[in-house]
Image (cartoon, helix red, strand yellow):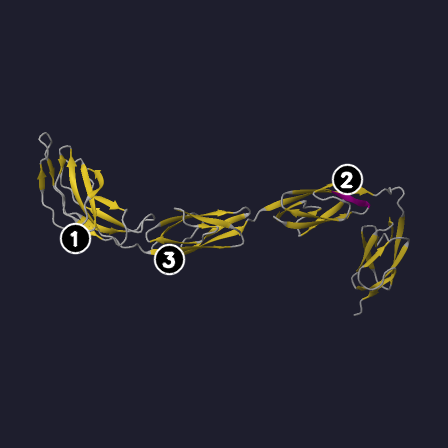
Amino acid sequence: MRSHSMHRLVHNVGRRGRVLACSLGLLSLLLGAATPAHAAQLTLTWSDASTNEDGFKIERATGTAGAYGLLAAVAAGTTGYVDAAVTAGTSYCYRVRAYNSAGDSAYSNAACATPASAAVYTVTVGKAGTGSGTVASSPAAIDCGSTCSVSVASGTSLALSATTATGSTFTGWSGACAGTGSCTLVVDGAKNLTATFALATTSYTLTLSKSGTGSGTVTSSPTGINCGSTCSASYASGTSVTLSAAASTGSTFTGWTGACTGAGSTCTVSMTTARSVTATFATNTTTASTQTTSTLAVRKIGNAKGAVGSSPNGISCGSTCRASFTSGTSVTLTAIPATGAIFAGWGGACTGTGTCTVTLTQATSVTVSFTKLRR
């Protein structure tokens, strides 16, 4: 850079003009940082001690021997100017003078400099996760999508934003940025960052209703529905849910309506939206007056005391050792020895020493043996 000291100047121009009293300090020239639009720039500064200028005229010459031409005019009180229209490696010289309605002052000293090329760094964006989306920058440089790496001049400020695809969510930045908001980078070196997208965890509700004169239960796989008591459940989007219907005694399952159809005991629905299914149960046509019954009789043997109970209720032997049940009923008997006795086993329609379960299709007899506990 070449510079000369500035002298105080008083310049009177024009017979009718007002005297321009202008004191300009030393003109200095700085190499400026790069901007996104240019590879280099130069910054001029000067001091202003005048009180009656209307502004300043800045002139520029290409090379130390080039002819000066007006580059810009700036307002009164201005003490600096950035020249971004320069080419790296080319020398430029500048001079400044004040002006008002009376005319122009003398020039300042000349200042010269040669801008160097700005450093260029690479910004690289990666994408991760099970979801999908895009990353774009302002000013436009990255569109990832397709362009996930770009070279920019040092000092460039890039604002990056993530946009999710349908069915995905943005879970955050890592690397040169963090968090889930927008990411602003000032490029002062190579930058690497990753945007992570995840599949959305949307869930939908499956609702089960029961209709008809009969009764029964409906369960699901995966678990959630047990209707019975729990007749709705939420499942992740895309889940395949199989419903199974089971009629109660005296009822028949007659079919599905809603998101399932048909009369099979199972149906499968895909949870891509909220679903409703109805299971219909009918009462069997055999009436209570025409239903047949079968008798179950329990006889106790052995040299000790004990009792026998049944499920469903009917036998309490003790006192009631015979009962009638609807044909087809499954009855479970339990032996309860008295104090000082042990249960020795079943006979008749049951054997062994565990519980006794009989399905009554005809009159059935069971013996139960209790013996004294040996001391």
The local secondary structure at tag 3 comes to loop
Residue at the disc numbered 3: 190
Nearer to us in this view, 242 or 43: 43
Q: Amino acid at mark 3?
A: Ala
Count of numbered circles on the image = 3
Image point (76%, 49%), residue name: 265
Give coordinates of residue 46: x percent, y percent.
17, 45
Mark 3 or mark 2, whichever is nearer to me: 3
Task: Farthest residue to the top: give it.
Answer: 16
Please identify the quarter of the rendering in which residue 263 is found.
top right
Q: Which tag is nearer the camera, tag 1 or tag 2?
A: 1
Which secondary structure class fits the magenta region best? strand
Label 1 to label 2, Cα distance in Å?
A: 102 Å
Q: Is residue 21 left or right of residue 309?
A: left
Q: Is residue 175 visible?
A: no
What x and y, as percent, mark residue 27? 17, 47
Residue in the foreground of this view, choosing between 219 and 107: 107
Residue, disc 1: 2
- In what element is the residue under mark 1? loop
Q: CA distance from mark 3 to mark 2?
A: 71 Å
Q: Secondary structure at mark 2?
A: loop
Magenta highlight range: 250-256
Confirm or deny contact between disc 1 and disc 3 (CB under 8 A).
Answer: no
Image point (15%, 32%), residue name: 101
Determine which of the numbered discs, if any, sits on residue 212 in the image: 2
Nearest the viewer among 321 and 65 is 65
Q: Please report whichever mark, 1 or 3, sits nearer to the chain's N-terminal start.
A: 1
